[in-house]
Amino acid sequence: MDWINVSLTSLSMAVDAMTVGAVDGIHEKKMKIWKVFFIALVFGTMQMAMPIVGYFIGYSFRDVLEGYIPWIAFSLLTILSLKSLYDFVSEKLDKKAKDEEKKEKEIRIPEILLQGVATSIDALCIGFVYLGLEIPQAMLVFGIIGIVTFLLSFLTTFFGSKVADKLERWASLISCLVFFAVGLKILLQGIL
């Protein structure tokens, strides 16, 4: 097994989840440690589960699914982007925005789960990449991807919440731009 390839794959698969985790941390400046852990756990689990699903689906559906995966990921992240843009515009137009800024912003569990799916759906294709490996070896690779994603997402979410004071008033706009950029990246990688 090529460990350098596995390491690079793990890092590249974790980037989307790390970015979204950092934005979540910025958005909710006083995020409790259990939520940081939960976000990292969701992202790591999804980044591990999707390649497993892709691995077991196999070549029989590869041609059908592979073309749609970037579009599905792009659509989900665009929805999150538009929601964040709406939140940003609403905050700016709302006459009580100053009072709202004093309130704690909260990332809700359904949003975290949607983010986990959206950032990992492209990982389905990684399962196809490792079809040449025996099941135990493939599961080891997918486990490494999940662990790396968990650790890096935990760190970026945690540190994102620490710099939130400086970026709080721009959090929704940053979320909008990041979600859209990640979705566009996934789409362009998938169609090019």
Image (spheres, helix red, strand yellow):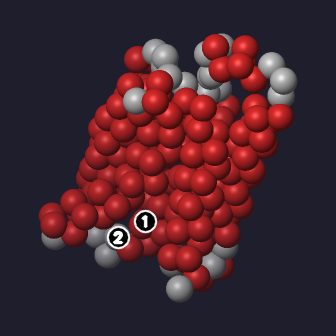
The residue singled out by tag 2 in the image is 130
**Picture coordinates of residue 189 (x, y %)?**
50, 76
What residue type is disc 2 on? Tyr
Residue drawn at x 71%, y 19% as measured from the top left: 98
Image-based side of 129 in relation to 110, left or right: left
Label 1 crowd bin: few (<14), some (14–19), many (20+), radius 10 Å: many
Image-based side of 12 in relation to 109, left or right: left
Q: Gap in Å between the C-alphas at discs 2 and 1?
A: 5 Å
* Residue 96 visible in the displayed image: yes
- SS state under label 1: helix
Closer to the camera in the image, 48 or 160: 160
Quadrant housing the N terminus: bottom left
**Picture coordinates of residue 69 (x, y %)?**
61, 68
**Picture coordinates of residue 181 (x, y %)?**
56, 61
- SS state under label 2: loop
Rendered image quadrant of residue 103: top right
- Asked whether the beta carbons under mark 2 and mark 1 sit within 8 Å of each other, the answer is yes
The residue singled out by tag 1 in the image is 127
